[in-house]
Image (cartoon, rainbow, N blue to C red):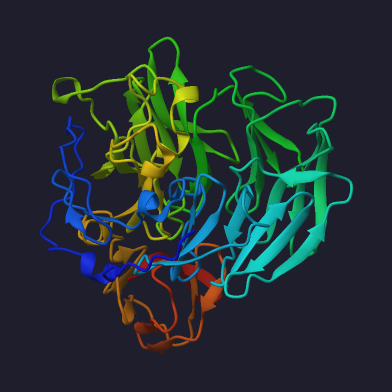
Amino acid sequence: MKRKITLVLSAAIFSFSISAQLITNHNTITQPAVAQPAVGVPFIDPRFNSTVIRITNAKESGIPGVFPDYSKHQAWNADESLMMLRSGNGDVHIYNGVTYQYIKTFPSSVSGVQDIYWHPTNPQLLYYAMDNTFNIINELTDEVTVLHTFPEYATVTTRAEGNMSNDGRYIALCGYDTIWTPIDFLVYDLVLDSVISSLDVRTHVTEFDWISISPLGNHVVVDYADKIVGRYHGVEVYDRQFNLVWQKPLGSGHSDMGLDSDGTEVLIMDVYDDDLNVYYIKKFGLSDSSSITLLTLSQEYDMHESCRSMSRPGWVYVSTFDFVGRLTDDDATWLPFEDEIFALNMDTPGKVERLAHHHSRRYSPTAFDSGNSIYESEPHATPNRTGTRILFGSNWRINIDSISSVDAYICNVGSLITSSENILPENQNGIKISPNPFKTETTISCNFDLTHANITVYNILGQSIKSRINRSGQHATIDRGDMAAGIYYLKVLHNNKSTATGKLIAQ
């Protein structure tokens, strides 16, 4: 990749008046004709009030497109100082996560790797699977360390759509032989440096779509992308030891796993209804197979879901795009949520935050099916951990038959969602947290003496990050310190009993 340095304004400048309105209705909102922006020049989406900025020019750089790795993979590193993007030749690119300037392209030895993930805490490290090894690479030095070799397999992979657990401890993989026959599903534990469980699938499985560990590492999910009832079909959910929990014939929809607002592990998936000819976006509980329908959408378009906003649990980010049967469109026939990026609440069916049109097009009369169109022009919208910035790819409906027309864009919605009703309430289970959200410190108030109470703050992984908290009488002060922006959980133990719990958000 050519090293073309382009000055891009800091993301902090992209905010706008807090009076801008978040769109939460289900009305038809047509996509306006907006000229493709130049790199580094932000503009306000005229329909949704978000700020959009183009961050690459692949054609000018002479490369086959620049776009998100996948909607299910987090693009930003642990402290959001860096971003990972892809090109059509398989190259992995690193960009500044704040200014969006190009930094480097990883060596050719990493090009084409399917499974690559940022380290959960170290912003310079990435994990990746290559052939039958699991490795770590240093972004600064390109130094590669082989963490584990799986000698019984020729290749180990999630098939490109899996994730590691949020704490970076577990990954679920499929082990293949030299002719790409699945041998085992397995769970590798990085802490123990050991395969802790496996399932022999040689006599049962010839192909499947993907395998992944769940966000908290409690479940393994395998998607076979069919509607057949029974073992080794549909979607299967196992515990970490490969004991079957449930199976459902859910078809070939896109999906992602995330955390509900109460920390429950869930699968969000779009499911096509053959009888009614509509798509449902559904939430499934991984532990009990419970399900609810969150939104009903037209069969005229496909979609991707992303639950990567792990510091904003309870929201899934959806990007729709016209399907193969819809080769033309206009204002008169435009559909609700068409060619759009929006956030969908996991707890309240129909509750949406509509964020941007992506202006990309995969199918048209000249690109009428999968074999004649550019897959990478699907937007694959991917939020950062707090859901305040969304990365997406777009050809801006220009030269849609060329992969070099696909570029990366950022939609900034920080001012919109922090001024909306989704902010956590101050009164929680008998305690008051104010201010909430907070920037430097916040105060807990209650109706009992906190002097000898045990007050602990946890991150979304359930890890204790702060327990030494100043307190006086019925008040306690939490200092922000090095807490990253995001959602945290609070627990108060009084007389060795859990007295109060709550949530707080650091901006």
Residue 4 position within the rendered picture, expressed as x and y whole percent measured from the top left: 39, 65
Q: How many marks?
A: 0
Q: Residue at the far top: name it.
A: 275
Q: Is residue 267 visible?
A: no
Residue 145, compared with residue 59, is above or below; it is below
Residue 488 position within the rendered picture, expressed as x and y whole percent measured from the top left: 43, 67
- Report the front residue among 478 and 411: 411
Residue 252 position within the rendered picture, expressed as x and y whole percent measured from the top left: 54, 25
Left or right, 283 with respect to 164, comes to left
- Report the front residue among 355 and 221: 355
In which image quadrant can residue 133 be found? bottom right
Q: Is residue 85 visible?
A: yes
At 50% across and 28% down in the image, what residue appears? 253
- Report the front residue among 337 and 1: 1
Left or right, 218 with respect to 380, comes to right
For the C terminus, the quadrant is: bottom left
Residue 320 position within the rendered picture, expressed as x and y whole percent measured from the top left: 35, 34
Residue 57, compared with residue 7, is above or below; it is above
Residue 173, compared with residue 125, is above or below; it is above
In which image quadrant can residue 51 be found? bottom left
In which image quadrant can residue 202 be found? top right
- Report the front residue among 467 and 44: 44
